[in-house]
Amino acid sequence: MGKIDTVTKDYMKKNTVFADACNYFIYGGRQIIDPDKLQELDTTEIAVPFGSGDEDFVQKYRDLLKAATVMMDDEAAYLILGVENESDVKYAEPVKAGLYDFLQYSKQVQQTAARHRKANDRKGHDSGEFLSGFYKEDTLTPVITLVILFDSKTWDGPRTLHSMMSTKNPNVLKCAADYRINLIEPAAMSDEDLDKFQSNLRAVLGFIKYSNNSDALDAFLSKESSLHNLDAEAARVISMCTNTQIDIDEDTEVVDVCKAVQDMNNKAEQKGLMDGKKEMAFKLHDEEGFSFEKIASIASESLATVQRWFAERSSTVSQI
């Protein structure tokens, strides 16, 4: 996995964040899924349907599952897939997400069959049940897969399996299974939607949503108090997914994102001012013949600074 994949997955593995995402999408923000009752599942233990002997086939799907975070409680199994930017929008995402679901169902069927073999409880069940290992009274735990787009752009990939089909014939499509992805997309969220989150996922998704609109981002920073004391893992997601330069040491536990953004803006303003002074200096020297001393006075900079500007320019030109 890439660095952004790793950062987002580590963040989503936090029970409070994972439960918050599921509660938002499934229950409209009501706190139904209890973080303390979530149990993480090891995706490397999920077998390929019905035990294919093709090692390349097996490895392909195990690699796919590495990108997923999977947890379950007494009600359902939940998977979260992170998509970090628009270039990574999967135009076959309905197929991929559906595959995750059915791999989970396959695992449940295999676990049930193993349980029956261990219990040796064939009595009263026909040969079809025995051979499949799944009895009439057995049930499956629902599997819900969420796709989170960690980018400010709008999702432009397909959202349903039917939308990927080559035909639009309604008679054909009604007989072909459909699958709709469950998408959390910051760009499509309103402020009311963001307010439904109870963890710092609200701050992360809100920052991502407004990251390309400086005025809207400033407004969000001013009202989202959690950004002044944000968990370091959440801050890393913001930094990586929005290309915001936030210095976060390995041992840092909390980050003042608002201050980091302000510092970044101040540096950008200072650089812009300095670049403007350099441009003015070069023009005054080259076109007007001003001396370095006079330019230093006009620019309110030291003579040494002005001389360094011209030395750097000369060095750059000589390297071309």
Image: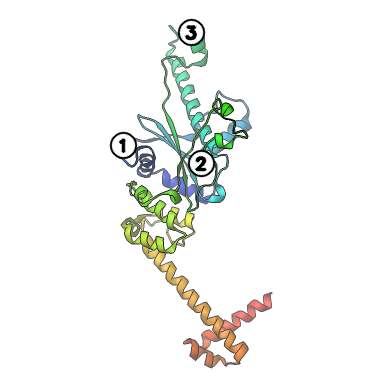
Circle on res. 126: 3
Number of residues whose C-alpha sits closer than 10 Å to that of mark 1, classed few (under 14), some (14–19) or many (20 or more):
some
The CA span between labels 2 and 3 is 40 Å
The CA span between labels 3 and 1 is 40 Å
The residue to which callout 1 is attached is 32
Q: Nearer the viewer, residue 251 or 297?
A: 297
Q: Nearer the viewer, mark 2 or mark 1?
A: 1
Q: Is residue 130 above or below residue 228?
A: above
Answer yes or no: is residue 111 visible. Answer: yes
Q: Position of residue 253 (x, y in %)?
A: 36, 55
- Label count reads 3
Disc 3 to disc 1: CB gap under 8 Å? no
Answer yes or no: is residue 95 visible. Answer: no
Is residue 111 shown left or right of residue 95? left
Is residue 33 shown left or right of residue 47? left
The quadrant in which residue 137 appears is top left
Number of residues whose C-alpha sits closer than 10 Å to that of mark 3, classed few (under 14), some (14–19) or many (20 or more):
few
Q: Is residue 188 above or below residue 178?
A: below
Q: Which amino acid type is marked by label 3?
A: Asp
Q: Which amino acid type is marked by label 2?
A: Ala
Q: Quadrant of the C terminus?
A: bottom right
| Residue at the (55%, 23%) spot, across then down | 50
The CA span between labels 2 and 1 is 26 Å
Q: Position of residue 263 (x, y in %)?
A: 41, 68
Q: Residue furthest front?
A: 170
N-terminal label among 2 and 1: 1
The residue to which callout 2 is attached is 67
Q: Which amino acid type is marked by label 1?
A: Ile
N-terminal label among 2 and 3: 2
Q: Nearer the viewer, residue 46 or 281?
A: 281
Number of residues whose C-alpha sits closer than 10 Å to that of mark 2, classed few (under 14), some (14–19) or many (20 or more):
some
